[in-house]
Every structure is written in structure tokens, then in C-alpha cells.
Image (cartoon, grey):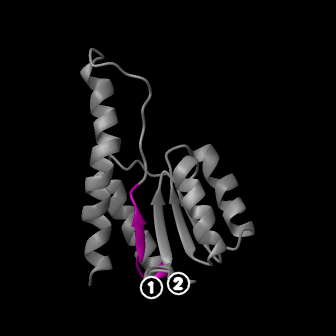
Amino acid sequence: MTHPAFQSNAVAVITGGASGIGLATAQRLAAMGLRLVIVDVREALLEPAAEQLRQMGAPEVMASSTDVSDREALVELEALVAERFGGTDILMNNAGIQPGSTLLDDSENWLRILGVNLGGIVYGTQVFVPRMIE
């Protein structure tokens, strides 16, 4: 049985959605007829991924180059998603980085990793979920 949120025309926002697990999830949701918002900082990957998702059955795809460690950028993105689609039905906080690091690396590298891998989840949830539960 499929969860009711996974109906065709539902809106799914997937961070880290231009490659890897995020793109694989978006592909499955496209085949189910969901409208998709893929978010990734790697701008060059976004449009090819969006086109692939359209070809796989997504009726609408929005691609956004947004840094999930920037809360204000996520606030702006959520407003755009709400304006274009009326809201978000599914949120997948998937963005993550591991540029290679050791415990002894400088703090700047670790702050970037934590900003994306932890902050992105916290900020994404804080920004998108309130409208989802209205």
C-alpha cells in the first residue's frame, strides 16, 4: 500500500536532488507522477537532472540552486514553492557533503560539513514543515 502523500500531482521537495540517492528518489517519484522540486548547489547538474525527470513522467519540475546551510535561502525557496505549487507534500532533507576530512582538519571545513549535513536538515524542517502541517 502506498502512503497517501505519494499521489500523482503531490509536490516533493528533495535536497541533494540532482545526483545520488536524491536523484534516484526523484526518479521514482517522477514515475509516480509527482511534481518535483530538486535542490542542489551544483548548478551544472540541475537542468540535466530536471530534464531527465520530466522525461520519466514528472508533470512539473522546479530546479533550484540553493545552499541548505543558508536558512534565509531556504525561506526564499519555500515561498517560491508555495507560490508555484501551493505548498509541499513531501520533504526529503537529503543534501549532504563529505569533501574529505579528518578530525584534525581546520574548523572552517568542519563548520561547512556540519552546516550542510546537520544545519540543512534542521533548517529544511523548520522552514518547510509548518506549512505542511497547516
Residue at (47%, 60%) from the top-left corner? 14
The residue indicated by pointer 1 is 4
Residue at (59%, 56%) from the top-left corner? 24
Residue 8 falls in image quadrant = bottom right
The residue indicated by pointer 2 is 7
Range of magenta residues = 85-93
Q: Residues within 10 Å of mark 2 (few under 14, many from 20)?
A: some
Q: Secondary structure at mark 1?
A: helix
Identify the residue at the far right of this view: 55
Residue at (27%, 32%) from the top-left corner? 111
Magenta segment: does it hold 111? no
- Residue 111 vertical position relative to residue 95 in the rendered view, above or below: above
Q: Nearer the viewer, residue 71 or 58?
A: 58
| Amino acid type of the residue tagged 2 in the rendering | Gln
- Say whether residue 98 is left or right of residue 37: left
Q: Nearer the viewer, residue 9 or 108?
A: 9
Instruction: Indicate which disc residue 64 carries.
Output: none
Discs 1, 2 touching: Cβ within 8 Å = yes
| Amino acid type of the residue tagged 1 in the rendering | Pro
